[in-house]
Every structure is written in structure tokens, then in C-alpha cells.
Amino acid sequence: MLKKLILAAAGLMIAAPVLADNGHHRYDQRHRYQWKHHPRPVVVMPPPRVVYYAPRPRVVYAPPPRVVYAPAHPVYQAPAPVSGISIRLHFPL
């Protein structure tokens, strides 16, 4: 662990000057670095065309009508007529 730490510290000490340089290699310290101005070409672009699209109409569906179940009416059988004659149809199978 200590060996790795020492190697990492030594690597940073060696790499520090290289990483500190921002790309301008000035080996000759007597002359100051002169920035040379290169004018850029002027490019005139027309503004972008503005096109307005109307929003789509919102479609709203009405909910289906509510189903209401009415209570069932009671069904009563008609009373059998009272008579003295009873006819039974009983056939043995």
C-alpha cells in the first residue's frame, strides 16, 4: 500500500509540469508569446422561418350513460279457479 502511494506521488510530481502547461510551449523565456489575430470570415445567415402550427383540437368523449337498474316488480301467480272438477293428466312412463 505504501509502495503504491509513493509511486503515485512520484508520478504526480513528474507529470505536474506537463499537466500545468496549457498547450503553449514557450521554451525561450526571453520573448513573450504574441497572440496573432486571424479575422474570421463574416457569415450572415437569414433568421429561421417562424411557422405557427395550431394545436390539435382536444377530443373529449362523453362517458356512457349510467345504467340504472330498476327493482323487479313482484310477479304473483293468478289463483287457480275453484271448481269441483279436477282433471289430472298423469301418464306412467
Image (cartoon, rainbow, N blue to C red):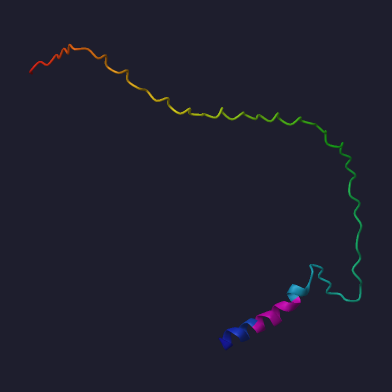
Residue that extends furthest to the bottom in the rendered view of this protein:
2
Examine the rendered structure and indicate whether residue 6 appears above or below residue 56: below
Query: In the image, 27: left or right of 60?
Result: right
Residue 32 placement: quadrant: bottom right
For the N terminus, which image quadrant?
bottom right
Query: In the image, 27: left or right of 85?
Result: right
Examine the rendered structure and indicate whether residue 90 appears above or below residue 49: above
Q: Is residue 72 magenta?
A: no
Labels in figure, total: 0
Secondary structure predominantly adopted by residues drawn in magenta:
helix
Residue 84 horizontal/vertical position (percent)? 19, 12
Q: Which sits in the foreground, 34 or 52?
A: 52
Q: Which residues are magenta?
A: 9-17
Residue at image x 91%, y 60%? Answer: 36
Q: Which sits in the foreground, 9 or 74?
A: 74
Residue 53 horizontal/vertical position (percent)? 76, 30
Residue at image x 61%, y 85%? Answer: 5
Residue that extends furthest to the front in the rendered view of this protein:
84
Q: Which sits in the foreground, 76 or 55?
A: 76
Query: In the image, 6: left or right of 24?
Result: left
Q: Which sits in the foreground, 49 or 57?
A: 57
Residue 35 horizontal/vertical position (percent)? 91, 63
Residue at image x 22%, y 12%? Answer: 83
Examine the rendered structure and indicate whether residue 71 appears above or below residue 92: below
Residue at image x 70%, y 28%? Answer: 57
For the C terminus, which image quadrant?
top left
Residue 58 placement: quadrant: top right
